[in-house]
Structure formats: structure tokens, C-alpha cells
Amino acid sequence: MLVAMVLSVTSLWAETRLLMAEEPGCIWCARWHAEIGPIYPKTDEGTAAPLQRIDLNDPLPADITLARRVNFTPTFILLVDGTEKNRMEGYPGEDFFWGLLGQMLDQEGISFARKGNSAHEM
């Protein structure tokens, strides 16, 4: 029981981020910024996994460990304490983005409200 409590407390302190790898001239990145960018930080998903943007051509920050190289833009990578846990390659459009992001968060046990401040309410 003590182990379960420690794991539970540890997961509360875990830093979760959504890393967006992009590059200049990426039309799908621009579309994401137009459709999702302004509302993302206001959503429950955005609160659960704040966005961090990186340029695909820049060196990866030292505090980030990826499972594999990023080859496509945009690529959205769910990071927990700087380590890749899940990824979405490409931007499938606004409707699919929210569902896929929700699945990524669910698969990692990251809670976020689905009502009230959810993306679908905005």
C-alpha cells in the first residue's frame, strides 16, 4: 500500500508537456496554429500537457529524451518528466486532433476534465 501511495504522489509531481516539433514552411503546422494554437492553452488538455515548441532543425534540448528521431512536421510528442511516452505524427485536423490527444493522455494515465473547459466546448 505504501508503494501505491508513493507512486500516486510521484505521478502528481510528474511534469507533463506536449512537445510540438515543427519547421519553417510547414503548412500543416500553420494550420494547427490557426485552428488549435489560440485555444490550446485554455483547454483542460492544454493545462494537463502545456505546449512546448521546437524547430525540427535545432538541436534537441538536453532535458528531452525521445524514443526515436522526429521525421515529420508537425509531430506532437507527449513528454513525462522529459521522456517521450507517446506521439502523434502529422496534424489530422481539429476534430481528430482532440480525440487522438485525449487517447494519448488516457493511455499514460494523465487526467484531464472532459467537460467544462474541454476543447469541444470552445
Image (tube, rainbow, N blue to C red):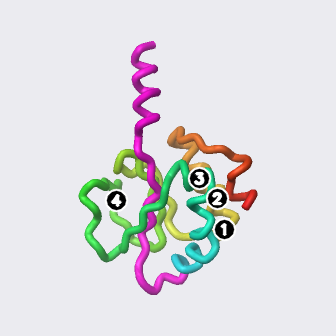
Between disc 3 and disc 2, the foreground one is: 3
Q: Looking at the image, is mark 3 or mark 4 nearer the viewer? A: 3
- Work out whether mark 3 precedes mark 2 in sequence or the reverse, and give the earlier one: 3
Q: Position of residue 15 (x, y in %)?
A: 41, 45
The residue carrying mark 3 is 45
Which range of residues does the magenta coloring cover? 1-27
Residue at 65%, 56% in the rendered image? 99
Labels 3 and 1: the sequence-earlier one:
3
* Numbered mark located on residue 68 in the image: 4
Magenta run includes residue 75: no
Quickly name the residue at label 2. Answer: 98
Whether residue 108 is situated above or below residue 122 in the rendered picture: above
**Label 4 vs 2, first from the N-terminus:** 4
Q: Which residue corresponds to the image point at 62% horizontal and 62% vertical from the top-left?
A: 97
Q: Which residue is at the front of the view, 77 or 41? A: 41
> Which residue is drawn at the image coordinates 56% and 60% (left, top)?
41
Does residue 67 sit above or below 12 in this rendering? below
Q: Residue 106 location, x and y as percent?
A: 58, 43
Lower position in the chain sequence, tag 3 or tag 4: 3
